[in-house]
Image (tube, rainbow, N blue to C red):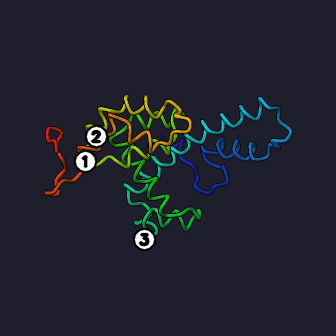
Amino acid sequence: MGSMVGSGSGDGSGSTAGVITTARVLAGVDAKELSDEECLGMVDDIEVARRSLDATSAGVLAEVDRRGLCDIRYGTATGVWFERRHGRSRTAVNREIRAGRRLRADLGGLFAAVAAGEITFERAAFIAAWVNDRNADAFSAAQQALLAIVGRGAGMVTVHRVGRRSRPLRRCRRRSRPHRGGEGVDATQRR
């Protein structure tokens, strides 16, 4: 695994050099010079690559956070460190870390689909946000149905609206809702 480690310098000197080099080459392409087919093809290719990179980023950030590397080395939380180092909002980074942690731990099928470019990280993160310790098994069991829903390329229908209508998602959410006693509702209980 040592060969898969980047240098962390952002200069493309580690095994991520190919990714960084490709991104810089693509950034230099003048879209005005491309044919219609090349433009559309480039958009599709970039989106698939972005999905894979989003999954990888979330997985690595979740691992950095799990190990407590930023706390040990820099005396700060992972989101704060990332914000200071890269300028991205710590709120967005923390959301990515939580989603990455949940996807890796409980929703491996969704995580693999994002890594393969089949669905967006945004859609997987939306589902992961609903998962908690009480309903993780239900969500894990419903992954194929959830993939069928979010993988359709729902067009104008947003993930939020799909989530409201999805039977598998409603069943999983029902198990996680608190009721009067503060406990999660058991699958056998009905109101």
Q: CA distance from mark 3 to mark 2?
A: 38 Å
Above or below: residue 82 compared with residue 104: below
> Residue 48 is drawn in which quadrant?
top right
Where residue 73 appears, x then y in whole percent?
A: 45, 66
Q: Which residue is mark 2?
A: 172
Q: Tell me if mark 1 has few (under 14), some (14-19) or many (20+) residues whose alpha carbon lies within 10 angstroms of its own.
A: many
Residue closer to the observer: 159 or 50: 159
Checking the image for residue 75, the label placed there is 3
Mark 2 and mark 1 in contact? Answer it, CB < 8 Å: yes
Q: Residue at x 37, y 36 (%)?
A: 166
Q: Residue at x 84, y 41 (%)?
A: 32
63 above or below 38?
below
Q: Position of residue 130 (x, y in %)?
A: 34, 47
As drawn, the residue found furthest toward the right would be: 33
Badge 1 marks a residue whose secondary structure is helix
Of residues 75 and 151, the one drawn nearer to the viewer in this rendering: 151
